[in-house]
Amino acid sequence: MDEAKIDEIYRKNAAIIYKYLCGLTQDTQLAEELTQETFFQAIKGIDKFRGDCKISVWLCQIAKNLWYKELEKRNKHKFTELDDTMPSNENVEYDCLNKLEKVEIFRLMHNLDDVTREVMYLRLAGDLKFSEIADVMGKTENWARVTYYRGKQELMKGMRK
């Protein structure tokens, strides 16, 4: 195939292939690299093009196959960097103390009235926002904030004892 014909194919299809790859990869730089590789592979294998479909369809197929190869390559080379530091005893002690504090907090929460305890559980264990707690309890967001604050004050009193 002559160079003028290859240039024409590139000019007519490069934007289409690039947009197609942007959609697949969600990465403009990678899409640009794969677009170039697509046309390189197409030029090498132009004799394999049978002409039973549009050339843009054939090019998209090449692009898709290159994207799949890229994904395989990335999955093969996924690794976790090893940290050559030894875990310190400080972290273990901190984690143990933190766990003991949590147990103590939940023990103290057990002594709260039912409604306050439920708000505290939803906030601490359920990780709900005050607006979500208000929806669950059928109250206002401000009510949820105040109830949580009062419960927290009770827990702090219990922790001081």
Image (tube, rainbow, N blue to C red):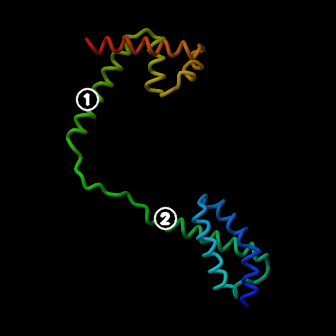
Instruction: Identify which amino acid the numbered label 1 is placed on.
Output: Leu
Q: Name the residue beneath numbered marker 2.
A: 74
Mark 1: secondary structure: helix
Q: CA distance from mark 2 to mark 1?
A: 41 Å
Residue highlighted by disc 1: 97
Q: Seen in the image, is 150 located left or right of residue 83?
A: right
Q: Residue furthest top?
A: 113
Q: Residue at (70%, 88%) from the top-left corner?
A: 47
Q: Quadrant of the N terminus?
A: bottom right
Residue 135 image point, x, y percent: 60, 20
Which amino acid type is shown beneath numbered disc 2?
Answer: Arg
Asked if residue 97 can be seen in this view, the reply is yes
| SS label for mark 2 | helix
Tell me if residue 143 comes above or below residue 4 in the rendering. Answer: above
Q: Quadrant of the C terminus?
A: top left
Q: Disc 2 or 1, which lies upstream in sequence?
A: 2
**Would residue 144 appear left or right of 98 to someone viewing this image?**
right
